[in-house]
Image (cartoon, helix red, strand yellow):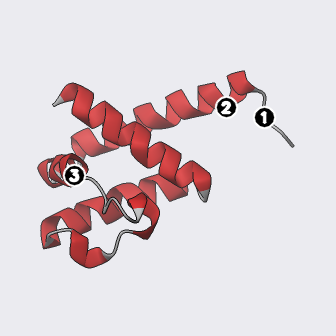
Amino acid sequence: MSMSMSDFEMKENKDIQTIMDAIGKYENAEDVYSGFKKGPDPKHGFMFTLDDWWDPKQLVAMKFVSNLVLDLGWDSSGYGFMMRKIEYEINKRK
């Protein structure tokens, strides 16, 4: 079943809000912000950045966000798309 663009945009906007709310309530939110400020390894992107790219606190925080994204059904190219949307939202707010 294909989604129309408006369905896609509605899911995107709803899920970004859900994720940003969860990050805001997360006890280690500053580690999330730090991880997204650093960004993924430029050679690999969010999906393929190795764990040792992040400091230990960032790694836990990035796995927290990654699980949120995957739990909402964003996988494959959608995963990278949502991680970049979160990065944009964090950089816009911080």
The disc placed on residue 64 is: none
Q: CA distance from mark 3 to mark 1?
A: 30 Å
- Using the rendered view, name the quadrant where residue 31 is placed: bottom left
Q: Quadrant of the N terminus?
A: top right
How packed mark 3 is, by other alpha carbons closer than 10 Å (few <14, some 14-19, many 20 or more), is many
**Residue 85 vertical placement versus 41 (above, below):** above
Residue with the mark numbered 3: 32
Front position in the image: 61 or 94: 94
- Helix, strand or loop at label 3? It is helix
Q: Earlier in the sequence, mark 3 or mark 1?
A: 1
**Residue 89 vertical placement versus 32 (above, below):** above
**Residue most extreme to the top:** 6
Q: Is residue 74 visible?
A: no
- Using the rendered view, name the quadrant where residue 92 is placed: top left
Q: Quadrant of the C terminus?
A: top left
- Helix, strand or loop at label 2? It is helix
Circles 2, 1 touching at the beta carbon (< 8 Å): yes
Q: Amino acid at mark 1?
A: Met
Give left or right: position of 58 versus 68.
Answer: left
Residue with the mark numbered 2: 8
Q: Earlier in the sequence, mark 3 or mark 2?
A: 2
How packed mark 2 is, by other alpha carbons closer than 10 Å (few <14, some 14-19, many 20 or more), is few
Percent coordinates x, y for residue 3 in the rendering: 78, 34
Q: Is residue 53 visible?
A: yes
* Residue in view at x 19 percent, y 53 percent: 38
Q: CA distance from mark 2 to mark 1?
A: 6 Å
Residue with the mark numbered 1: 3
Give left or right: position of 83 versus 10.
Answer: left
Percent coordinates x, y for residue 34 in the rendering: 15, 51
Percent coordinates x, y for residue 13 in the rendering: 51, 28
